[in-house]
């Protein structure tokens, strides 16, 4: 199956338009401010509707010329077999032999905060409820128009490498990669290292010494400092990416010393890895990849290589399941 038509009405600068897509790769080309980002964001709202971090319709999304009119999204999927028809029976439109999802959003101006109401139904007739399980069969991965890949590759809470590693089911590899056992082993190694001894001595001689003189606590309130954690995700998000020089990790570049284009390529590699993991671990029937400005920071030869690789990914995944790239 694949998304065949997508109708957008009263969304941002788009009054009304219908786009016809093909299976595989679809490329939107247009001048600045033509509405390409609005189309991709509308797709994200629909294809990731039930995800906890999904893009949501906001008050500013209503059409700038007629903000009182409802936002409408209508998606029609072409199907290939009875199995897809049965799995998505709540979306089936017998008149067109397609799967239809309809979204309608309206702004409640009587609400002091401008509450947005939504109505979603499947098939031909309004009122056909869509169970949450249906939305879980749609998986979407989004690659934004990056201007600062370094932010998402560096250690910290935005670290996508850490998010990716945390999402992997350790059963994919072998029993030796049990996450709890790996963390225990790591903590034992750190606990017995001279690094923690150094930190403890410095803390005792300096910080706690001053702290004792700055409090009235008779029990001599002291603090402890540790790098130990029981949280696998906590360790992963602090991982650091380095770029070796001449295949030698003893000499390496930091991300801020690397070119913007190659930082983008590293980011894309991790996002495409997440796509592979989702394909293997989730029970999806429709998988999609949305990429905004893939050419950002890439010179023409790398752009050509990137699109060629997308073609190979598309051919590989479409052999096994429904997959579409926008």
Image (spheres, rainbow, N blue to C red):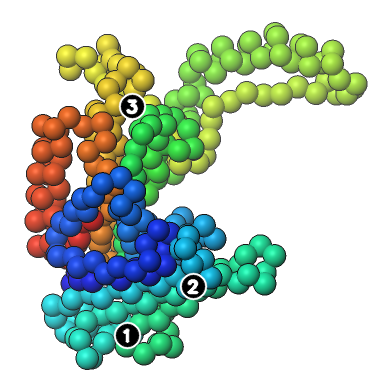
Give SS at disc 1: loop
Q: Quadrant of residue 210?
A: top right
Find residue 165 and name its label: none
Specify which label sits upstream in the sequence, 2 or 1.
Answer: 2
CA neighbours of label 2 inside 10 A, class few (<14), some (14 to 19), many (20+): some
Asked if labels 3 and 2 touch by Cβ distance under 8 angstroms, the answer is no
Residue holding disc 2: 69
From this viewpoint, which residue is outermost toward the top? 205
Tell me where residue 232 appears, x and y as whole percent: 45, 41
Find residue 241 and name its label: 3
Residue holding disc 1: 123
Give SS at disc 2: loop
- Mark nearest the camera among 2 and 3 is 2
- Pick the quarter of the image with the N terminus: bottom left
CA neighbours of label 3 inside 10 A, class few (<14), some (14 to 19), many (20+): some
CA neighbours of label 1 inside 10 A, class few (<14), some (14 to 19), many (20+): many
Tell me where residue 101 appears, x and y as whole percent: 34, 77
- Mark nearest the camera among 3 and 1 is 1
Q: Is residue 220 above or below residue 65?
A: above
């Amino acid at each position: 199956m694949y998304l065949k038509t997508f109708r957008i009405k009263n969304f941002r600068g788009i009054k009304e338009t219908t786009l016809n897509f093909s299976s595989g790769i679809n490329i939107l080309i247009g001048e600045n401010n033509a509405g390409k980002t609005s189309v991709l964001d509308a797709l994200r709202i629909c294809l990731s509707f039930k995800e906890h971090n999904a893009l949501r319709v906001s008050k500013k999304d209503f059409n700038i010329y007629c903000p009182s009119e409802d936002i409408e999204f209508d998606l029609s999927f072409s199907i290939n077999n009875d199995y897809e028809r049965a799995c998505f029976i709540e979306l089936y439109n017998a008149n067109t032999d397609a799967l239809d999802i309809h979204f309608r959003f309206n702004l409640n101006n009587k609400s002091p905060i401008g509450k947005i109401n939504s109505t979603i139904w499947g098939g031909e007739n309004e009122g056909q409820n869509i169970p949450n399980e249906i939305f879980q069969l749609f998986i979407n991965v989004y690659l934004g128009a990056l201007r600062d890949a370094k932010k998402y590759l560096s250690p910290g809470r935005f670290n996508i490498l850490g998010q990716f590693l945390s999402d992997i089911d350790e059963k994919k590899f072998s029993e030796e990669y049990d996450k709890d056992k790996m963390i225990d082993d790591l903590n034992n190694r750190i606990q017995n290292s001279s690094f923690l001894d150094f930190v403890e001595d410095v803390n005792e001689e300096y910080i706690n010494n001053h702290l004792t003189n700055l409090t009235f606590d008779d029990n001599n309130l002291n603090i402890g400092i540790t790098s130990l954690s029981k949280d696998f995700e906590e360790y992963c998000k602090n991982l650091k990416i380095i770029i070796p020089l001449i295949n030698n990790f003893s000499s390496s570049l930091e991300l801020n010393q690397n070119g913007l284009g190659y930082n983008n390529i590293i980011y894309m590699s991790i996002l495409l890895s997440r796509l592979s993991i989702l394909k293997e671990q989730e029970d999806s029937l429709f998988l999609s990849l949305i990429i905004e400005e893939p050419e950002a920071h890439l010179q023409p030869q790398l752009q050509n290589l990137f699109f060629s690789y997308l073609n190979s990914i598309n051919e590989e995944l479409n052999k096994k399941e429904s997959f579409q790239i926008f």
